[in-house]
Image (cartoon, grey):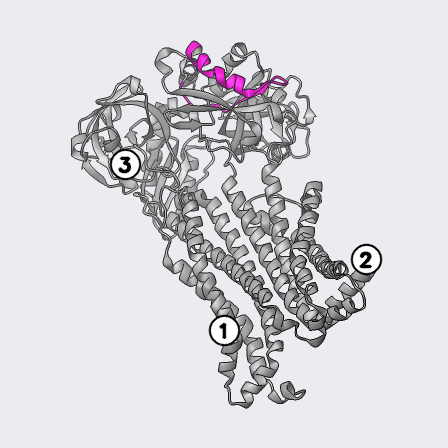
C-alpha cells in the first residue's frame, strides 16, 4: 500500500510540473535557510565544549562601581586556593601585543613581528584548559622562567619546517625566550585563543627597567585594578554558589579596608562566557543570544512562508482532483487511505527539497563563513545532532505542509466531488488560504522593513558626528599595546625619540598634524579612581581617564567650551592640569562649564585643577552611553601616535612616514591603521545582522512571489470561462488583469497594515540596546509595502495578462 501511495505521489508530481517545481523550489529555499542557521547556531552553542573539564571551569567576574569586568586584580588568584577548599586550581592570563624578533632559519636574517596574541599565564593553565601538544612536553610547561609555548601557526611562521624546540625568540628587543613546546591552537569555537604562552611572572620583565619593580609591587598591593582574566577549576561535585556565597567574606578578610567598597566577585560558568556574558574587557568579542534568536526566527519564518506556499498550492490543485477523490471513495477507499496518499505526496516533495537543500547548503557554507567570520566546513553538516535536527525539521515540514490539504479534500462528499460541485463548497478553505497569504505577506513586509531599519541604524552609527575628526587620520602604536602602560611605559629617552619623530613628521608635506595618547578615540579608556572636589575617597568614584599630549585637542578638532587647552607655555600643565568633558561637569556636580574651571581633582594621587571643559565626544563605541571623561598629560602612558594627513598622494605620504618611523624606531614595526576604518569595524555585528536579514528578506519575498504566481495560475485556470464571457461582452484586458489581481492587492494591503505594529515593536526591542539610535522611519514601511506589492504584481502580471489576452473561443468552446 505504501508503495502504491509513493508511486501515485511521484506520478502526481510529474503530471503537474509547474506546481511541483514551485513547491520544491520554495521548500528548498526555506530548508536551506534553516540548515544554514542550524549549523551557525550549533557552532555558537558549541563554544568551549571541547574543554575536557568544561563543566568545572569558571571565569571570575569583577564588579565594581557599576562596572562588570572579565578581569580581576592579579593578586586575587594567589589567595583563592587557600581561602576556598572547593577550588582545585586557579590560573591567571594576561594578553598583550609584543614586538618579537626571530632569526630566519634559512637566511639568518632578523625578522620582526608585532604579535597581538601573546598570553602570560600561570603554569596551572595546562591543568585547567585542554591543550594538545604537538612537539615538546607540557608536563612542566611554564615552570621555568623565560620559556615559551607556541601554537602551530606561529611555530611555522617563525621556523618553517625546522623543529622549534630549543629555539630562541626575542621579545621587546632584549628578552630571550626558549621554545619548550608547540600546541594545537584552540578551535574557532573557543572564547580565547593563544599565539604563544609565556610564564605569568615574565609579564613584568618586558616592562622598562625603571618600571618593572614598581609595577610588580603595585600589583601586590592593588586590589582594584581590573587586569587579568582568571580561571577557576572547582573540585568534582562542588556547587559554584557555595563559592559565590563566600566572596563577601573573602573580600572582608583579604582586601584592605580602604579598597573594599563596591567590590564584588562571582564565578561565571565557562559554557556561559560566549553567549551569556555582558561583561567588559573580554578576551574576544562574545556572541549574542539576541542575534541567535533573530536568526532562528527569520529562518523559521522563511520556511513557514514556503510551507504556506505548499498548503495553498496543494489545496488549490487538489480541487482539480475532486472527481478522482470521489471515485476512490465510491470504490471503497477509506478517508485514512486518502489522507495517507496526500501526506505521501507532501513527503516525496519534501524529500526532494531536503536533498537539494543539503547540497545547496554545502555550496553556501563559504558565503556563511564570509558573512559571520566563522570557519565552518562541510564536516559541520554531518554532525549527528545537525542531521537529526534537519531530518526532524523536514518531516515536520512535510506534515505541516501536507496535513491541511489532505484533510481538506478528503472531507468533501463524493456526491459533490463527482458532480464537480466541490469548488463551490469550499468557502472555508478559501478563507483559510487567504489568511495564509496574509501571513505570508506580513512576514515579507516585516523582514524588508526590519532590514531597512537595521541599515538605517548602521548608517547612523557610521555617520553619527563623534565630536572629533576621524577622517584621514592614521594610528600607529608607539609601543606594544599593554595594560601595564597605565603604570608607565614611555621613559625620558623614549619621549625624546617621540618628539624628534614628530618634528620630522612636520617636514613631510602630506602630514597635517600629529599627536600622542594612551588610546585611540572610540575604543575606550582606562577607568581609574578619582576624587573630584566635593567628594571623598569613600564615594569610590571610577571614571575613564585619557592620557593625551599637548596637541591632541587641536589634531582631533575637539571643541573647547570653557577655559583652555593644554599648553607648553604653562610649565605645570603636565603635573597639575586636567581637561574634562561636559558630562563630567554634570556627574561631578560642578554646575556649568565655566563653573568647573579651577575645581580640584585627585586622580590616584595626582592632584590638579580643571583648566578646560571640552564638548562631549564619543571616546567609547556608540553602543555605549556617554560617560564622564578626564584628560591629563601623562607621558608614560602614551601608546599610540595619531597622524593627520592630506587626502591627496596618500600612498606617497605613508611611504615617507614609514621611512621616518624606521629611522627613529628601528626595533619596532610600523603597523598603522586608518581611524575611520577601525571605527567602522566596531559595528561588524550589526553589519552582519543587517546583511543576513536582508538575504532572508529577499528569499522570503521570492518564495512569496513563487506562491503568488502559482495561485494566480490556479485562479486563472478556474476563471477561464468567466474571462471568455467578459471579453465577449467587451471587457478590456486591463480590467480583466485587475479582476484577477484584485484579491492579491487587497490581501497585500491588509498585510501591510498588520505588519506595521509588529515591526515597530520588534525594532524598538532591538534598538533599545543602543545608546544612540534612529527613530523608526515611516519611509521604511512605505518602501517595504511598495516593494512587496510591486514584486507581487510583477509576478502575477504575466499570468494575468496572458489569461486576459487569451482567445475567448477556446474558453467557451465546451459551453
Q: Which mark is residue 390?
A: none
Q: Nearer the viewer, residue 427 or 257?
A: 427
Tell me what residue is drawn at x 40 percent, y 16 percent.
222
Quadrant the N terminus occupies: bottom right
- Give the magenta-colored segment's residue range: 224-253
Residue 697 in the image: state x and y as whole percent: 52, 57
Which residue is disc 1 drawn over? 742
**Which image quadrant is residue 164 in?**
top right
Q: Earlier along the polypeptide chain: callout 1 or callout 2?
A: 2
Which residue is disc 2 drawn over? 2
Element under disc 2: helix
Asked if residue 704 lies left or right of residue 74, the reply is right
Residue 455 appearing in the image: no
Give the spatial CA distance, label 2 vs label 3: 83 Å
**Which image quadrant is residue 375 in?**
top right
Which residue is disc 3 drawn over? 551
Mark 3 or 1, which is nearer the eye?
Answer: 1
Element under disc 3: loop
How crowded is the residue under tag 2: few (<14 C-alpha within 10 Å), some, or many (20+)? few
Whether 187 is drawn above or below 414: the answer is above
Element under disc 1: helix
Whether 362 is drawn above or below 116: the answer is below
Amino acid at each position: 500500500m505504501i508503495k502504491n501511495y509513493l508511486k501515485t505521489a511521484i506520478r502526481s508530481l510529474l503530471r503537474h510540473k509547474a506546481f511541483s517545481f514551485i513547491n520544491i523550489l520554495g521548500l528548498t529555499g526555506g530548508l536551506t535557510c534553516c540548515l544554514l542557521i542550524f549549523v551557525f547556531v550549533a557552532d555558537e552553542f558549541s563554544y568551549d565544549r571541547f574543554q575536557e573539564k568544561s563543566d568545572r571551569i569558571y571565569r571570575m567576574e569583577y564588579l565594581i562601581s557599576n562596572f562588570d569586568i572579565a578581569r580581576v586584580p592579579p593578586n586575587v588568584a594567589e589567595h583563592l586556593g587557600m581561602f576556598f577548599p572547593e577550588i582545585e586550581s586557579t590560573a591567571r592570563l594576561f594578553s598583550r601585543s609584543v614586538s618579537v624578533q626571530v632569526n630566519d632559519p634559512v637566511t639568518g636574517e632578523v625578522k620582526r613581528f608585532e604579535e597581538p596574541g601573546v598570553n602570560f599565564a600561570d603554569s596551572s593553565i595546562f591543568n585547567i584548559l585542554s591543550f594538545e601538544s604537538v612537539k615538546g612536553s607540557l608536563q612542566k610547561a611554564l615552570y621555568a622562567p623565560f620559556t615559551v609555548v607556541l601554537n602551530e601557526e606561529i611555530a611555522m611562521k617563525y621556523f618553517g619546517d625546522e623543529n622549534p624546540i630549543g629555539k630562541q625568540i626575542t621579545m621587546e628587543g632584549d628578552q630571550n625566550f626558549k621554545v619548550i613546546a608547540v600546541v594545537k591552537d584552540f578551535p574557532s569555537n573557543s572564547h580565547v585563543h593563544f599565539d604563544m604562552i609565556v610564564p605569568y611572572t615574565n609579564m613584568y620583565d618586558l616592562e622598562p627597567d625603571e618600571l618593572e619593580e614598581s609595577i610588580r609591587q603595585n600589583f601586590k598591593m592593588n586590589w582594584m585594578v581590573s587586569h587579568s582574566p582568571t580561571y577557576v577549576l572547582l573540585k568534582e561535585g562542588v556547587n559554584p554558589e557555595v563559592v559565590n556565597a563566600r566572596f563577601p567574606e573573602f573580600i572582608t578578610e583579604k582586601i584592605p579596608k580602604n579598597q573594599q567598597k563596591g567590590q564584588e566577585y562571582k564565578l561565571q560558568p565557562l559554557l556561559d562566557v560566549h553567549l551569556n556574558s555582558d561583561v567588559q574587557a573580554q578576551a574576544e568579542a562574545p556572541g549574542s543570544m539576541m542575534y541567535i534568536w533573530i536568526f532562528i526566527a527569520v529562518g523559521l519564518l522563511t520556511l513557514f512562508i514556503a510551507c504556506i506556499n505548499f498548503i495553498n498550492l496543494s489545496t488549490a490543485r487538489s480541487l482539480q482532483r475532486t472527481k478522482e477523490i470521489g471515485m476512490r471513495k465510491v470504490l471503497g477507499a477509506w478517508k485514512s487511505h486518502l489522507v495517507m496518499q496526500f501526506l505521501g505526496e507532501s513527503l516525496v516533495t519534501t524529500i526532494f527539497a531536503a536533498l537539494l537543500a543539503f547540497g545547496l547548503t554545502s555550496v553556501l557554507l563559504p558565503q556563511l563563513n564570509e558573512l559571520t567570520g566563522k570557519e565552518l566546513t562541510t564536516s559541520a553538516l554531518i554532525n549527528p545532532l545537525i542531521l537529526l535536527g534537519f531530518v526532524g525539521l523536514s518531516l515536520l515540514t512535510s506534515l505541516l505542509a501536507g496535513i491541511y490539504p489532505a484533510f481538506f479534500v478528503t472531507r468533501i462528499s463524493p456526491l459533490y466531488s463527482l458532480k464537480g460541485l466541490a469548488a463551490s463548497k469550499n468557502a472555508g478553505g478559501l478563507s483559510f488560504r487567504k489568511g495564509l497569504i496574509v501571513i505570508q505577506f506580513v512576514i515579507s513586509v516585516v523582514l524588508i522593513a526590519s532590514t531597512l531599519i537595521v541599515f538605517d541604524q548602521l548608517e547612523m552609527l557610521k555617520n553619527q558626528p563623534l565630536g572629533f575628526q576621524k577622517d584621514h587620520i592614521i594610528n600607529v602604536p608607539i609601543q606594544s599595546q599593554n595594560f601595564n602602560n597605565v603604570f608607565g611605559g614611555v621613559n625620558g629617552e623614549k619621549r625624546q625619540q617621540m618628539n624628534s619623530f614628530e618634528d620630522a613628521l612636520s617636514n613631510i608635506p602630506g602630514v597635517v598634524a600629529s599627536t600622542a595618547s594612551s588610546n585611540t578615540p572610540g575604543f575606550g579608556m582606562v577607568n581609574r579612581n578619582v576624587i573630584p572636589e566635593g567628594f571623598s575617597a569613600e564615594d569610590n568614584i571610577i571614571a575613564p581617564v585619557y592620557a593625551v599630549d599637548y596637541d591632541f585637542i587641536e589634531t582631533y578638532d575637539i571643541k573647547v567650551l570653557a577655559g583652555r587647552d593644554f599648553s607648553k607655555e604653562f610649565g605645570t600643565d603636565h603635573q597639575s592640569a586636567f581637561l574634562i568633558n561636559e558630562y563630567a561637569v554634570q556627574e561631578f556636580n560642578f554646575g556649568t562649564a565655566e563653573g568647573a574651571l579651577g575645581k580640584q581633582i585627585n586622580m590616584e594621587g595626582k592632584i590638579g585643577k580643571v583648566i578646560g571643559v571640552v564638548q562631549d565626544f564619543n571616546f567609547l563605541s556608540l553602543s555605549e552611553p556617554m560617560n564622564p571623561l578626564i584628560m591629563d598629560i601623562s607621558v608614560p602612558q602614551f601608546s599610540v601616535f595619531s597622524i593627520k594627513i592630506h587626502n591627496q598622494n596618500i600612498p606617497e605620504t605613508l611611504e615617507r612616514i614609514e621611512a621616518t618611523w624606521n629611522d627613529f624606531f628601528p626595533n619596532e614595526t610600523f603597523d598603522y591603521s586608518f581611524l575611520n576604518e577601525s571605527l567602522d569595524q566596531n559595528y561588524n555585528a550589526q553589519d552582519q545582522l543587517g546583511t543576513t536579514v536582508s538575504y532572508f528578506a529577499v528569499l522570503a519575498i521570492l518564495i512569496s512571489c513563487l506562491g503568488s504566481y502559482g495561485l494566480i495560475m490556479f485562479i486563472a485556470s478556474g476563471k477561464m470561462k468567466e474571462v471568455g464571457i467578459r471579453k465577449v461582452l467587451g471587457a478590456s484586458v486591463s480590467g480583466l488583469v485587475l479582476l484577477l489581481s484584485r484579491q492579491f492587492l487587497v490581501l497585500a494591503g491588509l498585510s501591510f497594515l498588520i505588519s506595521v505594529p509588529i515591526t515597530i515593536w520588534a525594532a524598538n526591542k532591538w534598538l533599545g540596546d543602543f545608546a544612540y539610535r534612529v527613530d523608526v522611519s515611516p519611509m521604511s514601511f512605505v518602501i517595504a509595502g511598495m516593494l512587496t506589492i510591486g514584486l507581487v504584481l510583477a509576478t502575477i502580471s504575466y499570468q494575468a495578462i496572458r489569461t486576459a489576452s487569451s482567445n475567448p473561443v477556446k474558453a467557451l468552446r465546451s459551453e
